[in-house]
Image (spheres, rainbow, N blue to C red):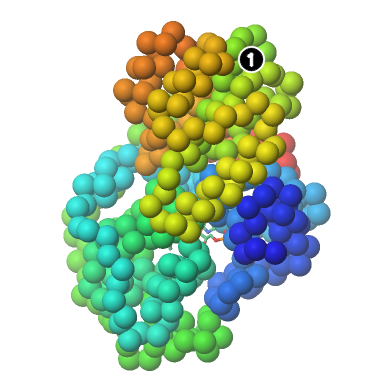
Amino acid sequence: MNDFPTNKINLLKHLNNFSKNEILNYSSNRNYDLGKPHHNVSKLSPFLRRRYISEEEVLRIILKNHKVENIQKFIEEVFWRTYWRGWLETHPWVYDDYKKYKENVFTPPKTGIGCFDHWCDELIETGYLHNHSRMWFASIWIFTLGLSWQSGAKFFEDNLLDFCPASNTLGWRWVAGIQTIGKPYIARAENIKEFTKNRFYPQNQLNETPNLDFKNLSNGKALNFNGKKFQLSEKQKNLGLLLNQNDLSFNEAFDKQNIQYSCCLYSTKHKNKLIDNFQKQLNEDICNEVKDITLTNSFEQIYQWLIDKRIKNLIIPYQTTGNHVFSATFLNKINLLGINYNFYLRDWDHNAFPYCNKGFFHFKKMINELLNLASIS
Ligand SMILES: Cc1cc2nc3c(=O)[nH]c(=O)nc-3n(C[C@H](O)[C@H](O)[C@H](O)COP(=O)(O)OP(=O)(O)OC[C@H]3O[C@@H](n4cnc5c(N)ncnc54)[C@H](O)[C@@H]3O)c2cc1C
């Protein structure tokens, strides 16, 4: 089976295999990067990022066979993604600052640091890196090679299958020591040796004692999150759902209530061929599975779909910071066509985001409550 199965049936098989064979050892094994095919971690991030499968569905499936207390670490990791999205949503200026950064994207030349060069190739060839390697890679980029964290974040942005504005920007800031201010992540040769089981040992090649200056830094005061809870209504006539990379499966909530709709899947070409191909294969699977669906790749095609299907009420996945696919101009045009639109904020995010304004430790205390609210514990 492909490393990243691009149809739902194979993805569910992959998830069930992981749940059966790996998850009970996840906590003790997850920090080891033993190379491809990375059996000890789930490799679900490219799917979760697009909500081709949702966090809720993943945990619901896994918790059918395991108790919460036996897979606590995995659950926490899934919630890290939710937490970062909520944190960026309540600190949007952090992303605006990153976006102001103008340096051109570049692929780092061979450095002679074996592990770093290997991870660079692995990322470009597969679109994936193990979490620990992302941390080491980012740390070497910043503290040994002396490059800016923003240029590294852009390099990831262009090559990761799972690129997520929140996890990526905040992951790089965390390594740089400006997310948890004054606590950078320093990659150490001994640690790399241990957690790659001797595959790599960059002895004397890393800067393990960089000069650091974190004076006068602040992340600013968090905004309150006040996104509205979405109300499913059977009364809305001529309903259209606009699936896109922010949520490729929110139509399932409407299926569950037997609410009729037409679907439009909006997807544009990605400049990275590997990512483009991955997206196309997911699109193909969705188009095979959803009854009344039209694939579009421009706003003009969406307007045409709205007219052809006589849509009166349009639902668009909620756009978190960094994920604004549809601009104000687009939304104005929808209004001009006489169509009501609403953003679909999943209950998952609605329940969690208000607790994402402080540190993860604070957020973590809410996990059981959030599982209860989703009726999955
Ligand atoms: C510098 C840096 C950049 C990163 N950029 C991204 C990114 O663009 N997109 C992305 O999805 N993740 C990013 N991460 C987080 C993490 O590395 C990946 O989510 C994880 O490696 C995905 O592999 P997996 O699905 O096998 O994870 P598993 O270990 O199987 O974890 C299960 C799920 O939990 C979530 N998760 C696990 N660890 C994290 C984490 N540290 N932060 C957020 N969510 C997590 C993911 O959704 C993941 O699929 C980054 C981390 C760092 C240090």
Q: Residue 36, position in %: x, y?
A: 58, 74
The residue indicated by pointer 1 is: 233
Q: Nearer the viewer, residue 69 or 280?
A: 280
Q: Residue 64, position in %: x, y?
A: 80, 49
- Residue at 19%, 53% (x, y): give it: 102
Farthest right residue in view: 65
- Residue at 32%, 57% (x, y): give it: 154
> Vertical placement of 256 versus 369: above or below?
above
Farthest bottom residue in view: 203
Residue 248 is left or right of residue 320, and the answer is right
Q: Secondary structure at mark 1?
A: loop
Residue type at mark 1 is Ser
Q: Determine if residue 62 is in view.
A: yes
Q: Nearer the viewer, residue 365 or 283?
A: 283
Mark 1 C-beta closer than 8 Å to ligand 1: no
Number of callouts: 1
